[in-house]
């Protein structure tokens, strides 16, 4: 039995409409705030749901590209990218203030997240936004990434994140969604994937290597049609091993 505590997060407010099935099984959530999906109505609905279940709330900003669901890399001028990310977060914060809830974290979405892991220009825009926020908000980042290092250098509090429903390459990048083995659909495989990362601090890659990884929060994508069942099974299996979800 492992006497350990982790966080499980889920991406929500993205137009799928399954939040009521997901929120009860997670400890934090990332709410789309108008870049790739979401509007004031969906944000408020999910905020209230998360509040009712005592789930920590994060902003999930993206490249401003609803057409491609924020999953297409964009080369934006630094000022424009900063402004877009800041406006998205501010739109959620306005609703949170109205609902008397604090913003807990920021987690970039899709291509913005992936680019920030390797691209200093993209990472800098995000870190500058974090520095502009008055309260000490956590930034969810992948281990051994450009944005992790830049955030630490700028005294931004970070939380290491790994993906429960995605496979990894040896360099800790996620397997491209264009590949058949990008996503994990099997509940048993997902549990072994996550439990290995928690218990050994290593991830089994598609090259069949064990690569060191650090993770404090594990994400399941809310747009995965099996997300509710996968989340329920993952939580039950982890708790059976003595792992607390907080």
Image (cartoon, helix red, strand yellow):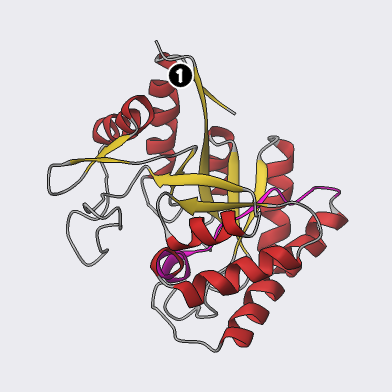
Image quarter where the C terminus lies is top right
Identity of the residue drawn at 50% across and 80% down? 65
Quick one: which residue is furthest to the left in this view? 207
In magenta stretch: residue 109: yes
Look at the image and tell me whether residue 38 can be seen. Answer: no
- Residue under label 1: 239
The outermost residue toward the bottom is 77
Residue furthest to the front in view is 153
Quarter of the image where the N terminus is located: top left
The relative height of residue 27 versus residue 19 in the rendered view (above or below) is above
Magenta highlight on residue 71: no
Mark 1 residue element? helix
Q: Is residue 150 visible?
A: yes
Where's residue 218, x and y in %?
45, 41
Residue located 12% across and 49% down the image: 207
Q: Position of residue 201 (x, y in %)?
A: 35, 32
Q: Is residue 186 above or below residue 119?
A: above
Residue occupying image coordinates x 45% and y 14%: 242
Front residue of this view, candidates 135 and 239: 135
Identified at 30% across, 53% down, the residue is 172
Span of residues in magenta: 100-115
């Amino acid at each position: 039995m492992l006497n350990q505590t982790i966080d499980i997060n889920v991406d929500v407010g993205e137009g799928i409409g399954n939040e009521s099935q997901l929120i009860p099984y997670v400890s934090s959530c990332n709410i789309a705030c108008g870049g790739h999906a979401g509007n004031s109505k969906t944000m408020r609905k999910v905020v209230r749901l998360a509040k009712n279940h005592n789930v920590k709330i994060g902003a999930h900003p993206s490249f401003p590209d609803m057409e491609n669901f924020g999953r297409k890399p964009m080369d934006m001028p630094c000022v424009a990218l900063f402004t877009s990310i800041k406006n998205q977060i501010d739109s959620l914060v306005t609703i949170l203030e109205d609902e008397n809830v604090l913003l807990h974290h920021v987690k970039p979405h899709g291509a913005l997240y992936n680019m920030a892991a390797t691209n200093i220009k993209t990472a800098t825009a995000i870190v500058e936004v974090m520095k502009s926020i008055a309260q000490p908000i956590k930034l969810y980042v992948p281990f051994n990434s450009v944005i992790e290092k830049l955030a630490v250098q700028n005294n931004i509090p970070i939380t290491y994140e790994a993906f429960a429903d995605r496979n990894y390459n040896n360099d800790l990048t996620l397997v491209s969604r264009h590949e058949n083995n990008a996503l994990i659909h099997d509940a048993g495989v997902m549990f072994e994937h996550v439990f290995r990362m928690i218990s050994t601090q290593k991830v089994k890659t598609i090259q069949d290597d064990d690569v060191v990884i650090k993770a404090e929060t594990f994400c399941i994508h809310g747009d995965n049609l099996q997300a509710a069942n996968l989340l329920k099974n993952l939580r039950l299996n982890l708790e059976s091993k003595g792992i607390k979800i907080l």
